Image (cartoon, helix red, strand yellow):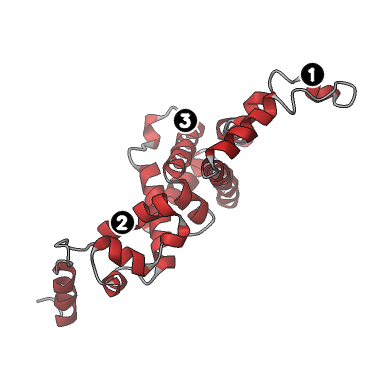
Amino acid sequence: MAPPDRVTAERRRRRPTKSGVVLSAELILDAALELLDEHGAEALTIRRLGTALGADPSAVYRYYRGAEDLLLALGDRLIGEALDGFRPEDHDDWAAALRDFGLRAYRAALRHPRVAVLSSYRVTRRPHEQRAVETGVGLLRRAGFDDATAVRHYHAFVDTVLGHAALDAAVLRLPADQRAGDEQAWSEAYAQLPADDFPHLNAVRDHLPTMAGPAVEHALDLLLAALRAQAPA
């Protein structure tokens, strides 16, 4: 028989809210994600979350210790989205698997840019993150790197991916007119600089508009080419 405190907790979790919804950890995360996506970090308070759920705010504390705990759980959910459907064995080699893994993490972050900006530099300590680190380090060990080097290379790899994700997520959060102005600067202000003063920029002026787009794939390819060259296997 389950201990009395466990039974009580389970009964509390099954109790419907005022709106008739039965709370769960995932349902709370859904509501928190919606608040963040729509209103930003200021909206992620336990009080506002309780209102969105139609529940007393104290009910949220049965699942999460507070806004910080929720944020880490949301960051872990993004990692889970990146891992969903990812199978290293579907790729020809470890580097191709790492590239796919990195791009999945980047795209998951951009689906929820507000969460990415707030959580990409944190350590969630949760199952999806643990599985991601296990997967990435495992691929690098498969490449023949010793244990210390595999960890060091994974650190560089994941920081490259998350750094680009946070940067591009911040760009997506800019007002549309600011974003358009920054993009036009490469084809207007920079491309029209005088050749006498800026000979190199003048020489590459036709290619400068590409600076407005994401650079994550190119950065990953450069990093993976360096890792391939060093791989013992």
Kindly state the secondary structure of the residue where label 3 is placed: loop
Q: Position of residue 127 (x, y in %)?
A: 37, 56
Kindly identify the amino acid type of the residue bearing the numbered disc 2: Ala
Q: Quadrant of the N terminus?
A: bottom left
Q: Answer whether labels 2 and 1 touch (C-beta < 8 Å).
A: no
Ranked by sequence position, the earlier of labels 2 and 3 is: 2
Percent position of residue 193, x then y: 81, 25
| Location of residue 4 by image quarter | bottom left
Number of the label disc, if any, that sits on residue 203: 1
Q: Which residue reaches farthest bottom?
A: 4
Callout 1–callout 3 Cβ contact below 8 Å:
no
- Label 2 sits on residue: 31
Residue 170 percent coordinates (x, y): 55, 46
Judge whether residue 18 can be spotted in this image.
yes
- Tag in front: 1 or 3: 1
Badge 2 or badge 1: first in the primary sequence: 2
